[in-house]
Image: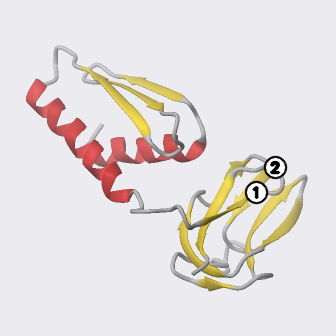
Amino acid sequence: MNIKEIQQLIKFVAKSGVHEVKIESKDLKISVKTGATPGKPIIYTEPSELINPALEQNIVRDLVSSQQDDEPVSDDHLITIKAPIIGTFYRKPAPDKTNFIEIGDLVSEGNVLCVIEAMKLFNEIESEYSGKIVKILVEDASPVEFDQPLFLVDPS
């Protein structure tokens, strides 16, 4: 498992809402546990006989620094738009169409942000706020739960 794969795993675990994931191979053991604050996983690694301890320290250091780079400086003023229903989240109306919104787009109240499929019905999710999309918190075609955060919007 290379650094990029480990970073992708950590991001997936942080966004998915899973509380703990353990992966073991003959070269490496990784356990990722999410902390009390959503999106900030706690990383534990256990060296195996085949791993160079210096290499393992570099992996952990790189993972921690990559997480810190992804964190917004201050999100106190941001509005979280949450899923109103359980279903599958889609960023575009159809596979051959473009995404409803991208990071940095300005949205107004009533703009369609995404669709959530529930029981073969595609429900358009509209913005209740006006502002700039700062972050999209869910991957396309991912399952979402009721009240799960989907987007961060800067109203200023």
Q: Identify the residue position indicated by label 2 in the image.
A: 86
User: Is the residue under label 1 in contact with that under label 2 (CB below 8 Å)?
Assistant: yes
Q: Residue at x 60, y 40 (%)?
A: 17
Q: Left or right of 130: which side holds 106? A: left
> Circle 2 — which element?
loop
Instruction: Categorize mark 2 by other alpha carbons within 10 Å: few (<14), some (14-19), many (20+).
Output: some
Task: Classify 11 as above or below 132.
Answer: above
What's the distance in space between the residues labelled 2 and 1, CA to CA? 7 Å
Amino acid type of the residue that numbered disc 1 sits on in the rendered structure: Ala
Q: Left or right of 117: which side holds 72? A: left
Q: Left or right of 39: which side holds 116? A: right
Labelled disc at residue 63: none
Residue nearer the viewer, 30 or 125: 125
Q: Position of residue 3 (x, y in %)?
A: 27, 44
Amino acid type of the residue that numbered disc 2 sits on in the rendered structure: Ile
The image quadrant that residue 48 belongs to is: top left
Q: Left or right of 40: which side holds 5? A: left
Task: Classify 53 as above or below 88.
Answer: above
The image quadrant that residue 118 belongs to is: bottom right
Instruction: Categorize mark 1 by other alpha carbons within 10 Å: few (<14), some (14-19), many (20+).
Output: some
Q: How is the image coloured?
A: secondary structure
Q: Residue at x 81, y 49 (%)?
A: 86
Circle nearer the viewer, 2 or 1: 1
How many labels, in total?
2
Q: Identify the residue position indicated by label 1 in the image.
A: 83
Q: Position of residue 149 (x, y in %)?
A: 66, 55
